[in-house]
């Protein structure tokens, strides 16, 4: 199975929650994990439509439709 990579620079809130990582590209599974574990740092008012749609898709694909935020 091919791993799909996400460019953090295309998603501003993902970019912000990756403060301790130098990599520009991240797997979808890792991105989903970061959103789940660092959700308290996501400014939901600043989420664009594309980023919201991606988060919903990641939740479907990697969280069985659910995102468990910490």
Image (spheres, rainbow, N blue to C red):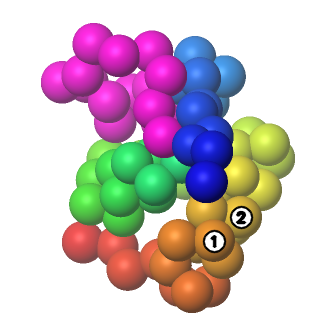
The magenta stretch is 13-27
Query: Can residue 46 be seen by looking at this rendering?
Result: no
Vertical comparison of 56 with 50: above or below: below
The mark lying in front, picked from 2 and 1, is 1
Q: Camera-side residue: 19 or 31?
A: 31
Answer left or right for 9 relative to 29. Answer: right
Where residue 50 sits, quadrant-wise, is top right
Residue 39 in picture, x, y percent from top left: 36, 58
Gap in Å between the C-alphas at discs 2 and 1?
Answer: 6 Å
Residue drawn where x is 61% and y is 62% of the image: 58
Residue 18 in picture, x, y percent from top left: 32, 30
Look at mark 2 in the image and give the residue it sits on.
57
Look at mark 1 in the image and give the residue it sits on.
61
Q: Residue furthest left?
A: 20
Answer left or right for 27 relative to 17. Answer: right
Q: Is mark 2 in CB contact (under 8 Å) with mark 1?
A: yes
Answer left or right for 48 relative to 4. Answer: right
> Which quadrant of the figure contains the N terminus?
bottom right
Q: Camera-side residue: 21 or 38?
A: 21
Identify the element where label 1 is drawn: helix
Binning the other alpha carbons within 10 Å of mark 1 as few (below 14), some (14 to 19) or many (20 upward) gives some
């Amino acid at each position: 199975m091919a791993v799909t990579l996400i460019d953090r620079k295309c998603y501003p809130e993902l970019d912000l929650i990756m403060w301790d990582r130098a990599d520009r590209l991240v797997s979808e599974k890792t991105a989903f994990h970061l959103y789940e574990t660092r959700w308290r740092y996501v400014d939901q008012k600043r989420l664009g439509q594309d980023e919201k749609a991606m988060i919903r898709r990641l939740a479907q694909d990697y969280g069985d439709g659910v995102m468990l935020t910490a």
